Amino acid sequence: MQRSVLVLVIMSVIMLAFLPWIASDVMLQFAINTLLLATLAQSWNILGGFAGYVSFGNSVFYGLGTYGTAIAMAQFGLPFWVGLMLGALLAVICALIVGLPILRLRGPYFAIATLGLSGVMGAIVSNMDIAGANIGLILPLTRADPMFYELSLGLLVVTTVCVAWLSMSRFGMALIAIREDEDAAGTMGVNTTRYKVAALVLASLFTSIAGGIHAYWITFVDPASAFDPTLNVRMVIMAVFGGSGTVFGPVIGSFLLSTIYELLAFWISTAAALLFGVVIVLAVLFMPKGIADLALAKEPGWRYFLRNVREHRL
Amino acid sequence: MSATAVPVLEGRRLTKRFQGLVSIDDVSFSLAENEVLGLIGPNGAGKTTLVNMISGTIRADHGSIFFKGQPIDHLRPFQRAHLGISRTFQVMKPFPGLSVLDNVVVGALFGTGGGETSIARARESAREWIEFTGLTHRIGQSAEALGGPDRKRLEFAKALALNPKLLLLDEVMAGLNLVEVDEVVGLVRKVRERGVSILIIEHVMKAIRHLSDRVMVLHHGEKIAEGEPSAVLSDPRVVAAYLGTRRT
């Protein structure tokens, strides 16, 4: 990584850390949401971007993080950080149990199998009294948006540092080899199963902590929103829009898309979702490799877009 | 080499069927330390199937494979790679989105004995293998951008980067011109001088004759001849398998 990029990133983080002192309440809420979504996209990037395994099951880890925190705080009166740890533990155990069988599947089969996961987990939680069954749980109210903001920012920084390390490490190289050709990677000595499961566990860890922070911030959890499959779709879109398999792509993708959506909702409230869809379609057509690839492209703007259209035979 | 030495690789009565088709039929063979065994036979004879069985991507229906006297039938491909078995693919399998250097780095990072732990050292050794196979001028290019002969070189460099004790070469010379074939023959010799045992599949008979200590011939999955190269290549059964018999 170039030193200038590193300096720029550190400066941005320091500036972002001071946001609660200048931003309005609405602005701060938008920022917390954006940071949490960016963390989710970045976590998805670990397995989806580096190893090429497109998961729609990450919202399960988010839900488990949500419920771990909610159960610890609402049912047992335990402190917030214990709840976060409980949620992370549940998610990691789930990743280990589910990962071993499901990561044997490849391509679309893996994606389909993961799609079922959040439905299953949502149904299980809806029938557990300790989790408030299908009514949900109410967490103790804390009005401390600046704290939630700093926590979310910290989590995103930690997740991104982890991905940056990954991109330069032996572990990351194994994941990339698996993405490029899993059979060839195996004959070259890569223990594919171990690295895939490790990537899923790492993703589940960060995803669940984001879920826990969100639960305490919103102070209410219910099965439908905790195990919402469209949340997972958003992770995929944001990571791919920014550039999956890159260090900063998913973060930039989330920031931009969240902002675009928020602006659209502000100007033309009802048609926002429609226009948002158009933005996604155009992005996939003209820059399928994401913003990260666009930023590194050698040719000027419109030529880059035309080349993408040509190369993908559209 | 003493007669009692344990062979590096030994196959005992190997059989593999794909549905009704018998691809490998009761084949036994052995490969001594630092030996070069040529494996020839017409298309569809089962040569690549045999290499797949040795590298672990498919399993034998019957029979066993031994590496340095130990059975390896239960080991997965990556475990066999850690033991020191490395291969090239006839249908080349470069990592398309990676540079030539990164392609080879993967081999150095995860090869024999589990591979190099430091990325920097893996890069260093990858550079050496790229130099060895004559690809240095392409080191930063994406593997996708390489032409046929350079892809062959890359396939070779990747396999060598694992630092193997046993190298399985599946048609690394196919599609090369005469000069390029001579180059690769020279490279295989140099690899052998490092003490590597080699199983080489090739249709280029000149190369097989120059490189092999022994030659084994497969036809319809059966071993029909084995022995010293010039004797085997003039064996009437081998000639008949390749060219067909004269009508009488």
Image (spheres, grey):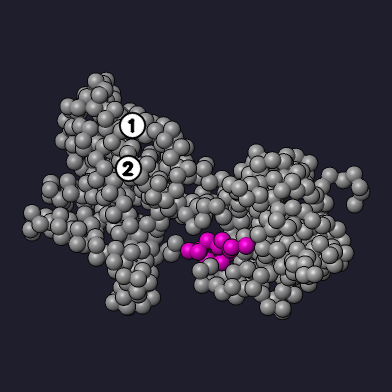
Q: Which residue is mark 1?
A: A87
Q: Quadrant of the C terminus of chain B?
A: bottom right
Q: In the rendered structure, are the residues bearing label 1 and label 2 in contact, judged by CB atoms less than 8 Å apart?
A: no
Q: Residue furthest right?
A: B2
The residue tagged with tag 2: helix, strand or loop? helix
**Residue type pointed to by label 2:** Leu
Between discs 1 and 2, the one toward the N terminus? 1
Local crowd at mark 1 within 10 Å, few (<14), some, or many (≥20)? Answer: many
Whether discs 1 and 2 lie on one chain: the answer is yes
The residue tagged with tag 1: helix, strand or loop? helix
How far from the left and from the top, in percent, is residue B195? 80, 57
How far from the left and from the top, in percent, is residue B165? 74, 53
How far from the left and from the top, in percent, is residue A10? 35, 56
Give the quarter of the image for residue A255.
Answer: bottom left
> In the picture shown, does residue B149 fall above or below A39?
below
Range of residues picked out in magenta? B90-101
Query: What number is the disc on residue A110?
Result: none
> In the picture shown, does residue A267 fall above or below A206?
below
**Residue type pointed to by label 1:** Gly
At x 77%, y 59%, the residue is B217
Chain under numbered label 2: A
With A203 as the anchor, is B76 left or right in this view?
A: right
Give the distance between the C-alpha atoms of the residues marked 1 and 2, in whole angstroms. 21 Å
Closer to viewer: mark 1 or mark 2: 2
Residue placed most toward the observer, B237 or A233? B237
Chain under numbered label 1: A
Query: What number is the disc on residue A115?
Result: 2
With A51 as the anchor, is B84 left or right in this view?
A: right
Residue A94 appears anywhere in the view: yes
